[in-house]
Amino acid sequence: MATLNNVESLLSTLPAPSADQVAGPPAQPSPVADIVAGLRTIAPLDGLTDEEYTWIATKGTERVGQDRSIVFREGEAACNMNFILQGEVQVRRRHSNAALFIGRAGSMTGKLPFSRMKTYGGEGYSVGPVWAIDVHESLFPEMMVAIPSMAQRSVSQLLDRVREVTRIEQQSEKLNALGKLAANLAHELNNPASAAQRSAASLFGELREYGDQKYRMGKLCLPDETTERYRDWIKNARARMSAYSNLPKGSQNPLANADREEMLIQWLNAHNVPNPWTIAPALSETTLAFDLLDELAAIVGPEVLPVAVATVASSLRVERMAETVVDSTVRIFDLISAIKDYSYMDQAPIQDVDLAQSLENTLVMFNSRLRNVKVELEFDQDLEPVSAYGSELNQVWTALIENALDAMNDMGTLRLTTHKGGQMALVEVWDSGPGIEPEIKSRIFEPFFTTKAPGRGLGLGLDTVQRIVNKHSGFVTVESKPGATCFQVRLPLDRLQAY
């Protein structure tokens, strides 16, 4: 029986391996008996007669290679059926480091009868010494006559190969989706976490400064009447500034704030307050009116005003930092809650899903890509929840929203709507992208069909969408024209119809 020693003796006839060493025929062909012995280790060939094994051994072409030898190149025409007698062949794509396929000793692989394989989808190279027998496709008709069972064996092998490649591709698609989700979540968490960290770090120093200012105020030993009027002024000022917290985020104009800060510096200089540039920024971020400052100046007098204004500014600065910490931690908590809702952690597999909430939770995952996107939400408030696998349904929204953003290059209008249509709930995902070309519209739900560049998509997103929607006894359709593409997902509202 052929052993690895036989292969090594064959390899000794080949030149030393180079960076582009290619596996090829040995200088001295192996005896037919050794090849037949090697073919008997091929599991898919179990049960062949001696004459059938001999036919493959005599009609096939022997090929050997040393470690790291090129067996075939990506894009080359596939024309050989391969029987790997010894060693291992790994197939990798140029744009991916992950092994797409691994052919080990005992495998029947390559181009098989009935296969539509035209070219190799990756580069195949040997891991350790390799010994194989190739049968050229021109011999397939003759092989079917000589070995009638080869048809069934080849079909079984093709089915197994399709299942394995599909599993690998789906796993890769899931990892890519998880990577994108993790990147988006990390980006969203980074901003509030950084803001909370900066504010918390500055808060220690500012609290000490505020304590020092309060100590200076206490050393002044103000009359009871002045102290009481100062406290009343603080209450009145806070009451008038309370509306500040209700202003929409981002409503303050940076230029207006800069102008206000400059006016405050001028006011402080006019009242002989030292270091006005350290006080004005804290006051400019509030709605503290100038008439209130004039009132404070009248209450405490020019000698006390510098300490009083500095104390007020320090107090406001501490409050703003604490508010930033609270807002940031609330934002982090909201993101974590959205992730839990998105993944339906700690919940039963089937839930009554609020479609509007499900879409909003999914949108949170894409916040980092929505800066230049106008998002329009139109949700039917009377639409009742649907019975569904919540986490799987969110995969549908993720795929559709991601496709919409990709189509628009993260610039344009994204519209999400929910409606009730008879006994079905209708969810629409619109985008203002260039639309789907009519010639490929009928293929977009096919597995592995994609218009994205290599490495950016495997073509399983819409296939997954269709499978999940079908699992819920629903269906998905698409309408598209330049500037308006709409994916429509219909799901039954009746639990009995869904399962």
Image (spheres, rainbow, N blue to C red):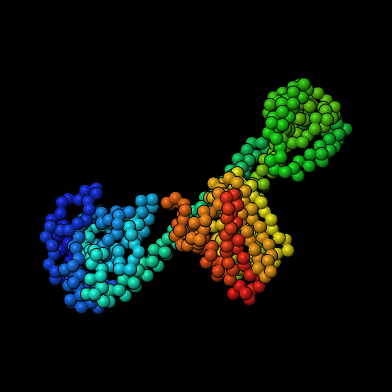
Q: Quadrant of residue 39?
A: bottom left
Q: Quadrant of residue 420?
A: bottom right
Residue drawn at (62%, 48%) of the image: 413
Number of marks: 0
Q: At which x and y percent is residue 431?
A: 60, 52
Q: At which x and y percent is residue 272?
A: 76, 21
Tell me, yes or no, if residue 169 can be seen here: yes
Q: In this image, 101 relative to 287: left or right?
A: left
- Which quadrant of the rendered structure holds the C terminus? bottom right
Q: In this image, 165 relative to 372: left or right?
A: left
| Image position of 302 with respect to 491: above or below | above
Q: Nearer the viewer, residue 301 or 102?
A: 102
| Image position of 9 with respect to 493: above or below | above
- Which quadrant of the rendered structure holds the N terminus? bottom left
Residue drawn at (38%, 66%) of the image: 162
Tell me, yes or no, if residue 341 can be seen here: no
Return the residue found at the far front: 439
Q: Nearer the viewer, residue 102 or 5?
A: 102
Residue drawn at (18%, 67%) of the image: 59
Q: At which x and y percent is residue 201?
A: 61, 40
Q: Nearer the viewer, residue 60 or 31?
A: 60
Residue drawn at (67%, 54%) of the image: 377
Q: At which x and y percent is residue 429?
A: 61, 56
